[in-house]
Image: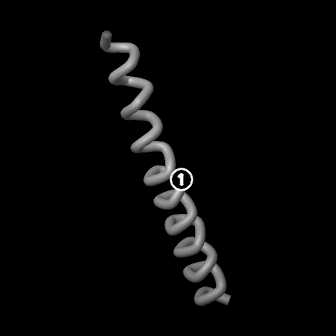
Amino acid sequence: PDEEKARSMMWVLYPIIREGFKIIGFAELQIKQGQN
């Protein structure tokens, strides 16, 4: 069923999204430190 497909997609995408947010947050920190 579609729900199973969606759940497996979440398992695949969630770590990627989380890593992306980590990278974005790190980049923003670097920018803020650069402006000081």
Where, by quadrant of the figure, is residue 10 drawn? top left
Task: Give the SS element for disc 1.
Answer: helix
**Residue at left 31%, top 13%?**
2
Residue depicted at x 58% and y 66%: 25
| Image coordinates for residue 3, horizontal then vertical, percent | 39, 14
Whether residue 7 sits left or right of residue 18 in the image: it is left
Q: Could you say which is closer to the camera, residue 18 or residue 6? A: 6
Q: How crowded is mark 1: few (under 14 residues within 10 Å), some or many (20 or more)?
A: few
Q: In this view, does 2 lie to the left or right of 13?
A: left
25 up-or-down from 21: above or below:
below
Outermost residue to the top: 1
Across and down, in percent, residue 24 comes to 51, 65
Q: Nearer the viewer, residue 29 or 7?
A: 7
**x, y percent for residue 22:** 57, 63
Image vertical order of residue 17 relative to residue 1, above or below: below
Going 40% across and 43% down the picture, which residue do you hit?
12
Q: In which quarter of the image is the C terminus?
A: bottom right
Going by the image, does 12 lie left or right of 30? left
30 in relation to 17, above or below: below
Please give the residue where the numbered disc 1 appears in the rendered image: 18
Q: Which colour scheme is used?
A: one colour
Q: Nearer the viewer, residue 25 or 1?
A: 1
Which residue occupies 33% across, 23% down? 5
Q: Which amino acid does label 1 sit on?
A: Arg
Residue 34, by quadrant, is: bottom right
Dividing the image into 4 quarters, which one contains the N terminus? top left
